[in-house]
Image: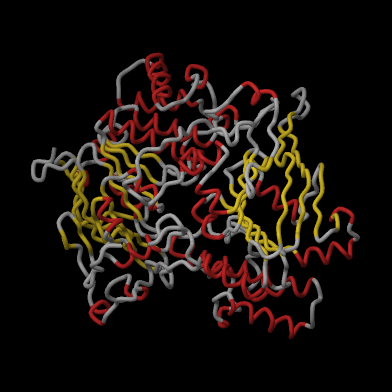
Amino acid sequence: MASVLIDIRKLEKTYPLGGGMLKGRSRIVRAVDGIDLTVMEGETLGLVGESGCGKSTLARLLMRLEKPDGGEIVFRGRDISSLSPEEMKTYRRRVQMIFQDPYSSLNPRKTALGIIREPLDIHRIAGRKQNRETAAELMTRVGLSGEQAGRYPHEFSGGQRQRIGIARALTLRPQLVIADEPVSALDASIQAQILNLLKDLKKDFGLTYLFISHDLNVIRHVSDRIAVMYLGRIVELAEKDDLYRKPFHPYTRMLLAAMPSCDPGRSGQTVTIRGEAAKSDEEGCNFKNRCAYRIDMCDRVAPQLKAISERSRCACHRAGEI
Amino acid sequence: MSRKTGHLLDIQNLKTVFETVRGNIRAVDGVSLTLNAGETLGVVGESGCGKTMLALSVMRLIPANGRIAEGSILFNGEDLLSLDEDAMRARRGRDIAMIFQEPMTSLNPVLRIGDQVAEAIRLHRRVSSAEALEMSVRLLEEVGIAEPARRVRDYPHQLSGGMRQRVMIAMAMSCRPQLLLADEPTTALDVTIQAQILNLITELTEKNNMAVILITHDLGVVAETAQKVAVMYAGKVVETADVEKLFRRPLHPYTRGLIESRPAGCSVGADGGSEYLKTIPGAVPSLYDLPPGCRFSDRCNRAQDRCRLAEPQLREEEEGHGVSCFFPVKNDR
């Protein structure tokens, strides 16, 4: 029975929009708008959504790069906002991140080896020589060669830079790795290599992944469970196969219909894809402006994420009936 | 129609070269393609394959350190490369239009969008500014922008990415071009917006019997939107076919590798259940440092000595199916 690694409860993060002296009321964006989510040890939890859904903000909150405005993040039973500075340092070793852009996420003035060993030096894991060897081993483990150790980021290709970023994330032997769109910026033929590498490393290092992507094909391939986000809220949570075979939420269905498939014979979409994600201060469901199944209640009451079947949860008033 | 071949667009052996500090490279290295009215050709490839430079060559918008060294581009029988700049400018935007990947950098941030669409119209047609603005409103409506009469007064930053791309399409469509070049038009957009933009392009294509060259790295987009496909690699076309044939029976090992390395969507036995993806080892070569012989040979699991000694030429291997390979893969997926 797997244990709970991270428990996210009613998490909120808002940002002010516009405002300033010349305008009156300043508006806020609810980037993360009441998220409840658990990450089980050993799983790959896929987080999928389009721009503005809050997935990157959620990642930054988990990394404690930002502080939430409401709710809690509980790691192995401890609320991370209550950690002392020493305990926080330990937390940072347990939770690491792989970033989307292999070009801007590496320090251009450090060598590949330097980038990978930096976390070891910061946390004073071992002496300089030992740290150097550990970093060199990791370099080869992610598919780079030792002779590239002294090269600088600009001398590597996008796929290779991503490998450096992955090695860096693993140096401290984390328990949870948050991968924020790790292959989106890579060529198709390199994506497959990196996805295979991530799979291997998960096994060898005993990792848990929170895998963020907008690409449903990638998410389908890597995830055990999938959470679909829309404008700051989770709208559906299901086991991988269930989500693709029997999606409950209208937004999930729209996403699946919009996904380009490699089947030229696929007949025209049966789901109407329309509208754009737009935050509003209005009450009710965030998706109502685009939803084909909208009813009165959707305008007034925001749906809660509720169990819809044994393993699936959905935030829709009409889930199960449509 | 072209007098010789009857095609709307007939590119023969196009070579576009660049002189750089590090050496001379051939971004487009002997590309031949044809396209007819009403057809959508998907040009697919990874970074550095030359697909964008191909489109810019057709538009004769190549950066200053590059030039078209060889070949011909026949549009309605007329070689665009033989035209002087004034004549080309008359065709550019009117007969052949292009839309780009990043709508924010393609739109002028300090002009209202109505004025930008009107500008595109007035470049080619003698209408008053009032008339042009009226036409702009109609065009915005045609591309699916709600409340177009109000929106004409907006600036680009007030629009979402999807809407800006619609504005770009409106500008491109303003003179009812015969050929539309779309360079990764949806890559920067969310997938639900992508689907709407691709639907819009298809709709406009059918309504106007327009020919489209759709450039993308995404095989799924090609499968859903194009009738014909050309796969490019390191400056050359390695395979061309109708879209069903290409996906059912890819002849070139690179095409096959690309299709089979896609997660979930396209793999053989696509139930998303396979543990590991089939990969193409290595990476796309730098144009400064091409392998000898076939450019794909150092990544190909079928490569023989012959492949390293000579470059294969594109030839029709099966009916309507061209491939540039000495040992094409001859079985269905």
| Vertical relation: B310 (above or below) A316 | below
- How far across and how far down the image is residue A274, in percent? 49, 31
B24 over A138 or under it: above or below: above
Decide: is B110 above or below B211.
Answer: above
Residue drawn at (76%, 28%) of the image: A26
Residue B19 figure quarter? bottom left
Image: B164 above or below A136: above
Expressed as whole percent of the image width and height from the top left, the position of residue A113 reads 64, 76
On the image, the x and y values in percent for residue B12 come to: 18, 53
In the image, taking residue B134 as reference, residue B241 lies left or right, namely: left
Q: Point out the image quarter for the N terminus of chain B.
A: top left
Name the residue: 32% across, 74% down: B297
Give the farthest residue toward the front. A310
Q: Position of residue A204 (x, y in %)?
A: 63, 75
Q: Kindly give the residue lying farthest to the left in the view shown.
A: B4
Q: Residue at x 72, y 42 (%)?
A: A32
Q: With A73 as the anchor, is B274 left or right in this view?
A: left
